Image: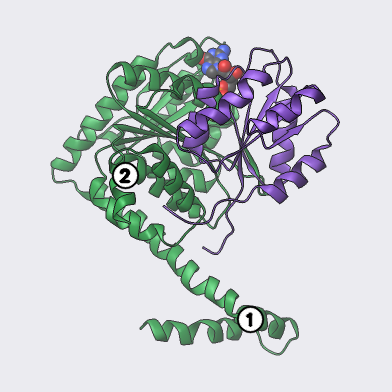
Amino acid sequence: MTQKRKIRVMVAKPGLDGHDRGARIIARAYRDAGYEVVYTGLHQGPMEIVQAAIQEDVDMIGLSSLAGAHKYNFPKVVELLKEQGVDDIIVCGGGIIPEEDIPELKKQGIREIFTPGTSLDEIVAWVEENVHPRNREG
Amino acid sequence: MTTIVDKVIAGEVRTVARLIRDIDDGIPEVRETLKALYPHTGKAHVVGITGAPGVGKSTLVDQMINRLRKKGKTVGVLAVDPTSPFTGGAILGDRIRMQRHSLDDGVFIRSLATRGHFGGLTQSTRSAIDVLDAMGKDYVIVETVGVGQDEVDVVKSAETTVILVIPGMGDDIQAIKAGILEIGDIFVINKADREGAEKTHSDLTLMINMDLKKYEGGKWKPPILKSEAVFDKGVEELLEEIEKHRRYMAEFEKGGLTTLRSEKARAELAELVKNRLLEEVFNRLIDSGDFDKAVESVAAGEVDPYTACDDLLLSRIDAIK
Ligand SMILES: Nc1nc2c(ncn2[C@@H]2O[C@H](COP(=O)(O)OP(=O)(O)O)[C@@H](O)[C@H]2O)c(=O)[nH]1
Ligand SMILES: [Mg+2]
């Protein structure tokens, strides 16, 4: 069929904080942009996120954090992906993340961080520009 | 190519995941891979679970996985959710209920969207089932929202179809009557902790007993079970019935009644041929621009649509002959 590859994104919420409103909002924005959004719910460990992302063959993982879980969890996801031999799934983060943490997170392989100041349109525009479903190979 | 096939058979997760993506994205090259995988299929027991949104399908599947794993069985899951007809996007949330199995390498879970490709859902889901089967999963469970014809067709590619309802779904029982009844091998009233489970049970019993002749000669009569998926109640009984149905199917076929197998083959092949025709002929018409030219002629009143259709197709069909 002559149809384009569809972007698949996973929205996941590592850490212990208790609500996922932000994650749900971003999931809906992605859906409205025409993506397939795999949503895995609350309290996900980094390894669970990575395994799910591999099984779902997503192009990007969007991690959401509200209560400081980002410092450990975000880089851990990147590290585990690498360990599993995966180098083509982009990892982004969002939520309440102090500005001063951002450079370090980026250094550790988080491609972009969206803070509460970033609009949904801006986030989608970023994905459009940076996430390209891979071309065919084995 | 061979390496993809070998890796799938070896159960290599990443390869399987990517192959399913290629199937879903309609990459033509997967056809060769699927051909090579086909001889390695037919071992898994394929179970379809269908029912309205929110009846507890994913919760039930999660408990089934848990129990099957304890019995040493491996499980593949395909969870199908609808694509938004307006945006083409989808939120696939079934995994939420099953995430506890994501570290278990005896379990492979994949969320799929219906995508609305001309009935292609059935074909791509069926191919994905084949992949999980070839990968060596003992059970492949397909969760679908039982509404559209597409979903009903998906369910038809399962060997055992479980229809899930909840108490007090009077209208839904009507809907079942209207079409899904025939395809249900097992009925489960989930959320039996809620009021009205008895009433739903007797409604369903009545419906199934309406045509008792159907079950004469030892034919399978759908059992009606009750469950409370969220409390892990009634799940073992369901697995037992599924196993009974599997054995029944095996006997049924052995008894010379190969109609079942040939019905499935007919449906599958018809689907493949239709889709392939669409793909080869229709898409080519579009790509060549001939279709658009014909559209303009019809719109301009230069030709009637019937003649335009003949013009577009007949020469090509002759070429096939
Ligand atoms: N009371 C009750 N709630 C249940 C039962 N099974 C599932 N649920 C709840 O029903 C909701 C929908 O379940 P889900 O599995 O997502 O339904 P699906 O849309 O059919 O896949 C969830 O909140 C479940 O916890 C049950 O047996 N009893
Ligand atoms: Mg579900």
Ligand 2 lies under 8 Å from the Cβ of mark 1: no
Chain B appears what colour?
green
Mark pair 2, 1: CA separation: 49 Å
Mark 1 lies on a secondary structure that is helix
- Residue with the mark numbered 1: B305
Label 2 environment density (alpha carbons within 10 Å; few <14, some 14–19, many ≥20): some
Q: Position of residue B201 (x, y in %)?
A: 46, 19
* Whether residue B55 is visible: no
Above or below B243: residue B3: below
Residue visible at 13% across and 41% down in the picture: B255
Marker disc for residue B7 = 2
SS for dot 2: helix
Q: Quadrant of the N terminus of chain B?
A: bottom left
Residue at the extreme bottom of the image, as rendered: B302
The answer for which chain carries disc 2 is B
Who's purple, chain-wise?
A: A
Residue plotted at (28% across, 32% down): B138
Residue type, numbered disc 2: Lys
Chain holding disc 1: B
Residue located at (41% from left, 86% from top): B318
Residue B98 makes an appearance in the image = yes
Q: Residue at x 20, y 48 (%)?
A: B258
Specify whether B47 is left or right of B175.
left
Q: Nearer the viewer, residue B122 or B40?
A: B40
Q: Nearer the viewer, residue B294 or B162?
A: B294
Q: Quadrant of residue B46?
A: top left
Question: Residue B321: which quarter of the image?
Answer: bottom left
Can you say whether B8 is above or below B285 in the image?
A: above
Q: Position of residue B317 (x, y in %)?
A: 43, 82
Q: Is residue A8 left or right of residue B183?
A: right
